[in-house]
Image (cartoon, rainbow, N blue to C red):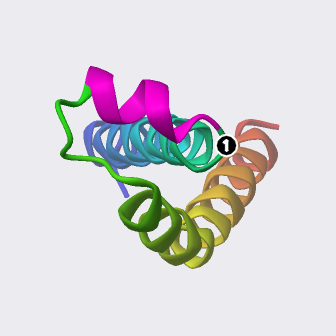
Amino acid sequence: MNDDRIRLVRKILNWSLLVLVILYIVTGFGITQFRIVEQLTMGLLTKSLSFKIHFNLIIPFIILLALHVSFSSLLKLRRK
């Protein structure tokens, strides 16, 4: 892979993981503090929807986190 593709893959991976972490936190907050989150989202994010989204995000989160860690480790080994 050339350097431009590596940078692009890293950016996509990092931003995707950031979005997923933010969603994970917001939906977790939507489960525990559902009254506040329902008001802030004008009723779009209910407690049951937060729970469904939060539960279904665990597998993509683990996959993206593993890719992020392994990709960073491989790049460090490649530079040495």
Q: Amino acid at mark 1?
A: Thr
Position in image of residue 77 (x %, y %):
81, 48
Position of residue 52 in the picture relative to residue 8 (left or right)? right
Give the quarter of the figure containing the N terminus.
Answer: bottom left
36 in magenta: yes
Position of residue 40 in the picture relative to residue 66 (left or right)? left
Task: Report helix, strand or loop for mark 1.
Answer: helix
What crowding class fits label 1: few (fewer than 14 Cα within 10 Å), some (14-19), or many (20 or more)? few
Residue position for label 1: 32
| Quadrant in the picture for residue 75 | top right
Position in image of residue 66 (x %, y %):
70, 64
Give the quarter of the figure containing the C terminus.
Answer: top right
Q: Residue at x 62, y 70 (%)?
A: 58
Q: Which residues, given as a range, are shown in magenta?
A: 33-40
Q: Main secondary structure of the magenta part?
A: helix
Q: Is residue 49 above or below residue 24?
A: below
